[in-house]
Amino acid sequence: MTPGEYLITGFVITIFILGIYAGLRLYKWNRNDMRKKLEKNIEKKKNKNT
C-alpha cells in the first residue's frame, strides 16, 4: 500500500472510532436523562396521590 492509502485508512478508522465513542456517550447521556425523568414522574405521582 502507498502512504496515501495508509493515510486514508487511518482517517476512516479514526472517524469510525470517534463515531462509536460519540454514540456511546449520547446513549449514556440519554439513559441518565430518562432515569431522572422516571424518578421525577414517580415522585409527582406519589405527591398527587397523597
Image: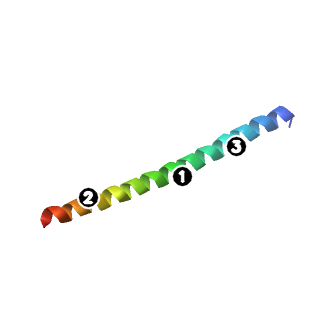
Instruction: Give the labeled residue for mark 3.
Output: 13
Which class describes the residues within 10 Å of circle 1: few (<14), some (14-19), or many (20+)? few
Instruction: Give the labeled residue for mark 1.
Output: 24
The three-letter code of the residue at mark 1 reads Leu
Q: CA distance from mark 3 to mark 2?
A: 42 Å
Q: Is residue 16 left or right of residue 47?
A: right
Q: Please state the horizontal and vertical placement of residue 21, each as a whole percent of the image.
A: 59, 49
Which class describes the residues within 10 Å of circle 2: few (<14), some (14-19), or many (20+)? few
Q: Is residue 26 left or right of residue 45?
A: right
Q: Please state the horizontal and vertical placement of residue 6, each as a whole percent of the image.
A: 81, 38
Residue extending farthest to the right is: 2
Q: Please state the horizontal and vertical placement of residue 17, each as a whole percent of the image.
A: 65, 47
Q: CA distance from mark 1 to mark 3?
A: 17 Å
Q: Residue at x 25, y 63 (%)?
A: 43
Specify the quadrant of the image occupied by residue 18.
top right
The three-letter code of the residue at mark 2 reads Asn
Nearer-the-camera pick, 5 or 35: 35
Residue 37's disc is none
